[in-house]
Amino acid sequence: MVEIRKVRREDAGCFVNAYFKSYQGLEEYAYRSRRLVKGYFKWLFSRDNQGFMVAELNGKAVGFVACDTNWISIFELKRVGEIHEIFVLPEFRCMGIASKLLSSALSYAKDKGRDLAELWVGEKNEKAIKFYENRGFRVVGKLVKWVRMVKKL
């Protein structure tokens, strides 16, 4: 049974390892050094640690999501539930874990009074774009190699 819990500082090592495995084949959208990924973890934790969650299966971290309800969208000019990060280890994909992580993040954003979720996804990451579209997100713009998607909460 998959359990979702809030990330703790001591999850940094698991996050870094899972990040590199999860971004295999999508390196153009990823940080490439352990130092940068560890810094990214610290930044996500500092932004909104209550919205930073880990999925565990039998006590093993298999995926992460970071929802930042302190984020002010420059497009919406208001606070939104910004999904900075979501990934699941490749060997645990297609088991509903990403859906559960995303659902937990969106519920958190709604509970914090946000009425819109926003995220950016790599333009060539067609699986992720389809995943988000199937969950009510819609493409609303593009900037360089990133696609902006939103969903009303």
Image (cartoon, rainbow, N blue to C red):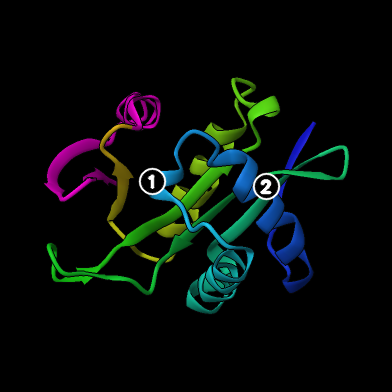
Residue 104 coordinates in the image, percent (x, y):
54, 47
Query: Disc number at residue 18?
Result: 2
Q: Is residue 122 visible?
A: yes
Q: Which residues are magenta?
A: 125-153
Residues 4 and 86: in front is 86
Quadrant where the image shows the N terminus: top right
Mark 2 lies on a secondary structure that is helix
Where 62 sits versus 7, above or below? above
Residue 137 coordinates in the image, percent (x, y):
27, 36
Is 142 magenta? The answer is yes
Is 141 magenta? The answer is yes
Q: Quadrant of residue 71?
A: bottom left
Residues 102 and 85: in front is 85
Residues 152 and 145: in front is 145
Q: Is residue 5 visible?
A: no
Q: Residue, x 60% and y 50% (percent of image)? A: 19
Query: Disc number at residue 79?
Result: none
Disc 1: CA contacts within 10 A as few (<14), some (14-19) or many (>=20): few
Left or right? Give the position of 55 relative to 108.
Answer: right
Residue 27 coordinates in the image, percent (x, y):
46, 44
Residue 146 coordinates in the image, percent (x, y):
24, 47
Q: Residue, x 36% and y 59% (percent of image)? A: 81
- What residue is disc 1 on? 28
Q: Quadrant of residue 49?
A: bottom right
